[in-house]
Image (cartoon, rainbow, N blue to C red):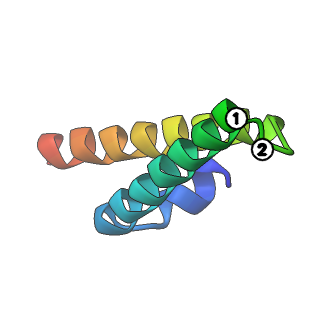
Amino acid sequence: MNAKELNDKTPDQLREELASLKKESFNLRFQQATGQLENSARIRTVRRDTARVKTVLNQKAAQAATE
């Protein structure tokens, strides 16, 4: 997922994406704690995707505030 794809989405879609990423992050952390995690690199990817979504949401909020 890149920032261009996220810029095309509405804030509601971004919030839904953020919620699903947080759920996935929780599940991955749970799997890691129980020793069932197969792809440990996925945690990093999900964390970075979460940061991207939050960044785009903040940019859209700032843009709406200036308009």
In the image: residue 30, left or right of residue 31: left
Percent of width and height locating residue 45? 71, 40
Number of numbered discs visible in the structure rendering: 2
Residue at image x 31%, y 48%? 60
**Residue 21: image location, x then y, percent:** 51, 52
Q: Residue furthest front?
A: 34
Which corner quadrant holds the N terminus?
Answer: bottom right
Crowd around label 1: few <14 · some 14–19 · many ≥20 (10 Å) = some
Q: Residue at x 23, y 44 (%)?
A: 61
Label 2 crowd bin: few (<14), some (14–19), many (20+), radius 10 Å:
few
Question: Do tag 1 and tag 2 residues touch (Cβ < 8 Å)?
Answer: yes
Residue picked out by circle 1: 32
Examine the rendered structure and indicate whether residue 58 appears above or below residue 16: above
Estimate the x, y position of residue 26 in percent, counting from the top left: 51, 43
User: Disc 1 versus disc 2: distance between alpha carbons?
Assistant: 6 Å
Left or right of 31 in this view: 9: left
Q: What amino acid type is highlighted by mark number 1?
A: Gln
Q: Nearer the viewer, residue 42 or 63?
A: 42
Q: Nearer the viewer, residue 57 or 20?
A: 20
| Residue 47 percent across, percent down from the top left | 59, 35
Disc number placed over residue 3 in the picture, else none: none
Q: What residue is rendered at 39% in x and 56% in y? A: 19
| 9 up-or-down from 64: above or below | below
- Secondary structure beneath disc 2? loop
Q: In the drawing, does residue 6 fall left or right of residue 58? A: right
Looking at the rendered structure, the secondary structure element under dot 1 is: helix
For image coordinates 81% across by 36% down, the residue present is: 41
Is residue 47 positioned above or below 5 on the image? above
Q: Name the residue beneath numbered marker 2.
A: 36
Q: Which amino acid type corresponds to the residue marked 2 in the rendered image?
A: Gln
Instruction: State the residue in front, 31 or 51.
Output: 31
